[in-house]
């Protein structure tokens, strides 16, 4: 008896993910309202149909792709809609208690953004048939990414600043966070650059005991990444974005060279920048002080983190149950701190399960990286996977007070169009890369050594 093919497996997992999301939406209504409203069937049914269409796109354009990528992203996206729907119910109840008009629901808007995100996913799956084509435009894409990352900092605060951070571009009722797209473009550039300069990174340097120290002039990529990280931190007042960009570039440099010395240099740059930032910037000092003792600043800057910790403590091991907690007591509970709501209503077990989904998604991306035969593809897949892992660590670490709170969104879960569109674009690239890696005509075993020894050629 033959095993089911990857697309058959994917179809079954897509149906399972959609069923879990529909059931969770119904449980939210039962827990919060005591009955199932009209929204869960509409949201759940539309969501299931949407990702069945995404499955057909993968079946047609990337038939050999990893069957786990789409269902995992679908389940995470769906759980985000579940929590946003839960917060909509809480907002409506609070408005009714105060005698105010019922606010418009965010969950249908998030589903609409998901529709646009899946359309972008489908377009990229069709247009980017060979990932190596991206290497031709690496410098253009890198310049565009740097421009997008820096643009909000150059604009007036009236159109770019939200909650003290200049990360947005607001045009009328629409808002865009260009940094979400910039990270993907910068990863494409970094992958192409590291492969093109492989000799520079792997042969030059001076030996110091077991380590090879790179020459100062060879540190240019790391210095540029560090410089832009500091620029973002200084001008845009955003710690998370700067940490994410620098962390991903450092991971890619290490993968390309297999040299621990690069990690040591990167750690030195990060430590130096942290000390200088703490000294110069009041908002960095504030976040560090809140991290040390959130409750000491409960009525000021520590309120958000304190409420998050109270919610996680209330949830305990198994949670209060969907619809039966108070995640709305945490500011920005549908965005930066959505993990706190999941931890409260699903408990440590539920939050751990969500983190395992991210871990599995990252692991499948790294498996794709190892199976690809060209250095550019390997670094691109590894960089995209590292982005997910680092961003989740930063966001959940902030919500649990493991590290200072940074303000990033949780991939696929958080409310917002920019984040959702960028992550669906990232998913599309991983699907294309995994199709290339798993196709029989390109399958092979990578020889031992650094990926920098591989070439990137268009066949």
Image (cartoon, rainbow, N blue to C red):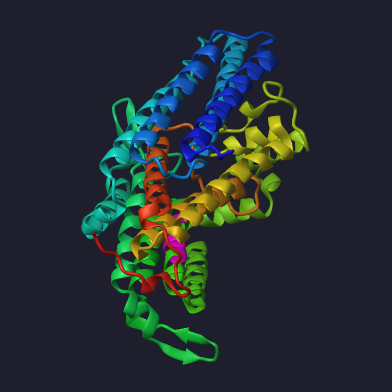
Q: Residue 231 in the image: x percent, y percent?
A: 36, 59
Vertical relation: 11 (above or below) 287: above
- Residue lying at 54% horizontally and 30% vertically, measured from the top left: 12
In the image, is residue 397 part of the stretch drawn in magenta?
Answer: no
- Residue lying at 33% horizontally and 49% vertically, measured from the top left: 182
Name the quadrant containing residue 160: top left
Q: Residue 48 in the image: x percent, y percent?
A: 49, 22
Q: Quadrant of the C terminus?
A: bottom left
As drawn, is 70 to the left or to the right of 345?
left
Q: Which residues are magenta?
A: 244-251
Magenta span: helix, strand or loop, mainly? Answer: helix
- Residue lying at 35% horizontally and 28% vertically, measured from the top left: 116
The mark tally for this picture is: 0
In the image, is residue 247 part of the stretch drawn in magenta?
Answer: yes
Vertical relation: 154 (above or below) 457: above
Name the quadrant containing residue 63: top left
């Amino acid at each position: 008896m033959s095993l089911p093919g990857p697309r058959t497996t994917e179809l079954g997992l897509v149906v399972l993910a959609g069923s879990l999301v529909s059931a969770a939406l119904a449980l939210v209504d039962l827990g919060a309202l005591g009955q199932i409203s009209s929204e869960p069937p509409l949201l759940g049914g539309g969501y299931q149909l949407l990702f069945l269409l995404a499955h057909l796109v993968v079946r047609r354009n990337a038939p050999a792709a990893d069957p786990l990528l789409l269902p995992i992203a679908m389940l995470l996206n769906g759980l985000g809609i579940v929590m946003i729907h839960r917060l909509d119910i809480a907002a409506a109840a609070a408005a009714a208690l105060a005698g105010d008009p019922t606010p418009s629901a965010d969950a249908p808007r998030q589903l609409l953004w998901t529709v646009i995100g899946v359309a972008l996913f489908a377009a990229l799956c069709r247009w980017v048939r060979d990932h190596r084509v991206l290497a031709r435009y690496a410098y253009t894409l890198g310049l565009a990414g740097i421009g997008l990352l820096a643009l909000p900092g150059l604009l007036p605060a009236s159109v770019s600043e939200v909650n003290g951070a200049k990360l947005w571009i607001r045009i009328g009722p629409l808002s865009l966070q260009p940094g979400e797209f910039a990270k993907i473009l910068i990863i494409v550039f970094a992958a192409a650059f590291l492969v093109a300069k492989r000799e520079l990174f792997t042969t030059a340097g001076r030996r110091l005991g077991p380590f090879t120290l790179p020459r100062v002039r060879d540190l240019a990529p790391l210095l540029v990444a560090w410089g832009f990280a500091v620029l973002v931190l200084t001008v845009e007042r955003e710690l998370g974005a700067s940490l994410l960009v620098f962390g991903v570039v450092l991971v890619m440099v290490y993968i390309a060279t297999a040299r621990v010395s690069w990690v040591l240099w990167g750690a030195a740059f990060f430590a130096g920048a942290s000390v200088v930032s703490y000294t110069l910037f009041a908002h960095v000092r504030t976040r560090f002080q809140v991290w040390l003792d959130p409750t000491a600043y409960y009525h000021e800057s520590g309120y958000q983190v304190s409420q998050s910790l109270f919610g996680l403590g209330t949830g305990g091991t198994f949670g209060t149950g969907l619809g039966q907690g108070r995640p709305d007591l945490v500011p920005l509970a549908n965005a930066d701190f959505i993990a706190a709501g999941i931890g409260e209503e699903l408990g440590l077990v539920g939050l751990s399960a969500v983190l395992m989904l991210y871990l599995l998604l990252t692991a499948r991306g790294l498996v794709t990286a190892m199976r690809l035969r060209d250095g550019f593809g390997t670094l691109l897949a590894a960089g995209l996977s590292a982005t997910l892992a680092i961003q989740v660590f930063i966001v959940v670490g902030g919500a649990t007070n493991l590290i200072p709170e940074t303000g990033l969104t949780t991939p696929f879960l958080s409310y917002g169009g920019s984040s959702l569109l960028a992550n669906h674009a990232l998913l599309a690239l991983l699907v294309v890369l995994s199709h290339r890696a798993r196709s029989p005509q390109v399958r092979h075993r990578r020889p031992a050594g650094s990926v920098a020894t591989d070439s990137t050629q268009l066949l």
